[in-house]
Amino acid sequence: MVTLSKSLVKKLYNKNKLSTIKIAEKLKTTPWTVLGFMARHNIPRRTFKEANQICFENKKLTFYLKKRLSAKDKKLKLAGVFLYWAEGAKANGKNCSVDFANSNPEMIKIFVRFLREICGVDEKRLRVFLYCYADQDIENIKNYWYSLTNIPKSQFSKPYVKKDFLPEKSGKMKYGLAHIRYADKKLLYQIDNWIKEYCKKI
C-alpha cells in the first residue's frame, strides 16, 4: 500500500502545479487515491478556471521565437508588431487567434514575413480567409494572395462573398480583403506583450 505525505502532495499540486493524474503517476498510485487523500487532509482542489490556466501555461508552443535579432530583424519585428496593433484582432479574453486583416498587399507581405522570420510559426497552421464581393473573380483573388504569401491554397478558408453591396463599392478592393490567421493564443499574447513593451519605450 502506498503511503502518501501531505507536504509532498501539496508541493506537487500547488507549487509544481501537477494534475492529480500526474501526481498519481509520480507516486505510483491511482488518481482516485490522490483525490481521496486530498479530501481527507483538506487540500483544496483547483477551480475550473485555475485548471484551465495551468493547462494553457503547460501547452506546448507551436512557434519558435527568433532570439538573436539583426538590425534588419529588429526593423521587421517593429513593423510586424505595429501593423498588428493597428489592424489585428486584439487579445481580449475571447479571441484565441492571431488575425491580421488588410487589403494592402505590402502590409500583408510584411506581416507574413514577421510571422515566419521573427515568430517562427508552423507553416501548416497558417490560414488565409478572404472577404470578397460577388462581382469579383474569386479564383483569381485566391491565386493572387497565394502568389503573394506563398501559403498553399489548401490552407485558405472558405471565403466570405458579400452579395449585397453598393455599386460604387465595386472595384474598391481589387483583390478583396485578406485575413492572415494563426490559431495560437500564446502567440497572440506574445504579440500583445511586445505592443505594450514598445509603447512603454516610446
Image (cartoon, helix red, strand yellow):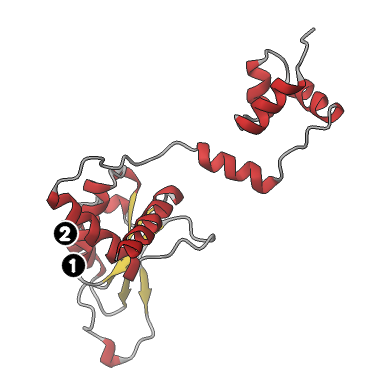
Disc 1 residue type? Pro
Do the CB atoms of the residues marked 2 and 1 lie less than 8 Å apart? yes
Image coordinates for residue 10, horizontal then vertical, percent:
71, 27
Residue at the top extreme? 1
Residue 96 in sight in this render? yes
Assign a secondary structure to mark 2: helix
Residue at the front extreme? 201
Assign a secondary structure to mark 1: helix
Q: In which quarter of the image is the C terminus?
A: bottom left
Q: Is residue 37 above or below residue 166?
A: above
C-alpha gap between disc 2 and disc 1:
8 Å
Q: Residue at x 63, y 24 (%)?
A: 22
Image coordinates for residue 160, horizontal then vertical, percent:
38, 70
Disc 2 residue type? Leu
Position of residue 196 in the picture relative to residue 45 (left or right): left
Image coordinates for residue 181, horizontal then vertical, percent:
35, 57
Q: Is residue 195 above or below residue 133?
A: above
Position of residue 187 in the picture relative to residue 92 (left or right): left
Q: Which residue is drawn at 81% across and 23% down?
A: 37
Per the rendering, the mark at residue 150 is none
Of residue 17 and residue 143, the one placed in the foreground of this image is 17
Residue at the right extreme? 40
User: What residue sits right under mark 2 in the picture?
Assistant: 148
User: What residue sits right under mark 1 in the picture?
Assistant: 105
